[in-house]
Every structure is written in C-alpha cells, then in structure tokens.
C-alpha cells in the first residue's frame, strides 16, 4: 500500500498557488516521489516526480524536504480545470500504489 | 503527443461472460500495466507485463484474469468469467525505459466495465 499521508481535501482560489502537502516519513533512499492527478473518472494524469532535488515542469513544481520525509506539489496559478484528486505516490519499483489522495477544489 | 488508448470506453456484460479489454500503449513503450478502480475507491494495481510475460501481479489478479500482447501494438486484459464485483474502471498504462521507480507510467482513459 501507498506509504503516504495526504489531507483528504483542500480548496484554492482561482489564480492563486495551490500547495498540496504529502508526508512520506518511511521513504527509503531509492524510492521516488510521484504526483498524479485524476479528473472525475478519467485516467490518472502524470504531473511530476523527483528523488531528492526539487523539480519543475510546465505543470507544477515539486519541493522535497532535505530529509525526504515530506514533499509539496505546487500549482503556481490554479485554474478551475485543476480541480481533481491529487495523488502522492512513493515508488520503490515498477508498480504504483495509489492512496486516497487530496481532492483539490479550485474556486472562482 | 503520444497517448495510451483504450477500447471500448464502456462495456456491459452479463455475469459469467468473458470480456476482453483492449489497450494500445504508446508506440515505443515496452512495459505495460493494468489497474482498476471500483467506483468511489482507490486505483488498484493489477499486473505489469514486459517481454511477453507477467513481471508482477497483485493479489487481485487471480486465475480469472489474463493478459496478452497479441501483436506489436495491442495489450489486452481478459476476464474469463465475470462477477458482479468486477464492475469497475480499468486503466491501461505504459512506460518506456523500465527503470523501475524512475520510469513514468502514462495512463489511458479507461474502460468502464459493468457486469449485470
């Protein structure tokens, strides 16, 4: 099972940054942190991943603490279309174990 | 942008019938996966497949399930004798490099299976 803890829900105002936290206190050295999101019942959409360093791409930024026990996904300017369930997943190998995620609601 | 496709989008079947769910992974990808999501529940890993054989499977993936890559483009999930509890969204995913945890999986849109 996923070894992560996320708040069940969060709200964010449209145009503001959405900061989604994830605790993974039992992460080991070779495990990556992945973020996916799922809009309604669509297939999970890859957002970003990292091992130790902070990462940024066109969708989001991933901030991983120095001890790697927690991370934060940042959507810099949330839009209504970013309303979704966001999953933080710690992966030791090929298969991915999804948790319940955080339901982010972006409000006008 | 390349994407994983799945057909059909919705499949309705009678209990006890066999169903085959089809997926076309991204063309240069070598690793293939099936996941399922029962309505209102988590996305659950079923099986991973590489080099024409299963590399990992979960406890859900019992003898009623099988996977196959019948040609160079398709990847299928067969449920031999469907049960009511098999009703779920089934997602196919693929990845390219097989770098284990460093390998990003890309998901298809899913097939909604309804067993009556």
Image (tube, coloured by chain):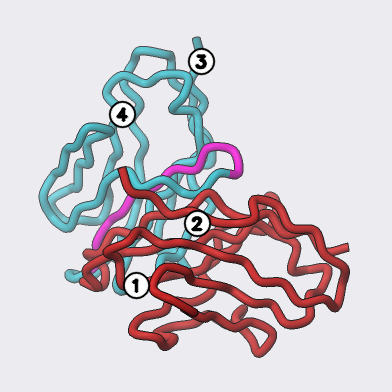
Chain colours: A cyan, B red
Q: Which residue is mark 3?
A: A107
Percent position of residue B65, x then y: 64, 82
Q: Residues within 10 Å of mark 1 (few under 14, many from 20)?
A: many
Q: Which residues are magenta?
A: A31-41
Q: Nearer the viewer, mark 1 or mark 2?
A: 1
Callout 1 secondary element:
strand
Q: Is residue A39 above or below residue A95?
A: above
Q: Residue furthest top?
A: A108
The 10 Å Cα crowd at callout 2, few under 14, some 14 to 19, many 20 or more, is many
Q: Are marks 3 and 1 on the same chain?
A: no
Residue at which label 1 appears: B31
Q: Which residue is mark 2?
A: A99
Q: What residue is rendered at 49% in x and 77% in y?
A: B47
Q: Secondary structure at mark 2?
A: loop
For this rendering, which residue is in front, B33 or B29? B29
Discs 3 and 4 carry the same chain letter: yes
């Amino acid at each position: 099972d996923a070894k992560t803890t996320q708040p069940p829900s969060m709200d964010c105002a449209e145009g503001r940054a959405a900061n989604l936290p994830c605790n993974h206190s039992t992460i080991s050295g070779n495990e990556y942190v992945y973020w996916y999101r799922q809009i309604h019942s669509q297939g999970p959409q890859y957002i970003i991943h990292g091992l130790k360093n902070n990462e940024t791409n066109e969708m989001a930024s991933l901030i991983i603490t120095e001890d790697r026990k927690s991370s934060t996904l940042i959507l810099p300017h949330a839009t209504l279309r970013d309303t979704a369930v966001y999953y933080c997943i710690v992966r030791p190998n090929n298969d991915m174990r999804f948790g319940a995620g955080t339901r982010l609601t972006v409000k006008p | 942008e390349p994407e994983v496709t799945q057909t059909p989008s919705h499949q309705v079947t009678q209990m006890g019938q066999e169903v085959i769910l089809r997926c076309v992974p991204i063309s240069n990808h070598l690793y293939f996966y099936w996941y399922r999501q029962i309505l209102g529940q988590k996305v659950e890993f079923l099986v991973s497949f590489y080099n024409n054989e299963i590399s990992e499977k979960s406890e859900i993936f019992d003898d009623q399930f099988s996977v196959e890559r019948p040609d160079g483009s398709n990847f299928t999930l067969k449920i031999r004798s469907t049960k009511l509890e098999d009703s779920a969204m089934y997602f196919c995913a693929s990845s390219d490099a097989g770098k284990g945890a460093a390998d990003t999986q890309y998901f298809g849109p899913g097939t909604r299976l309804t067993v009556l």
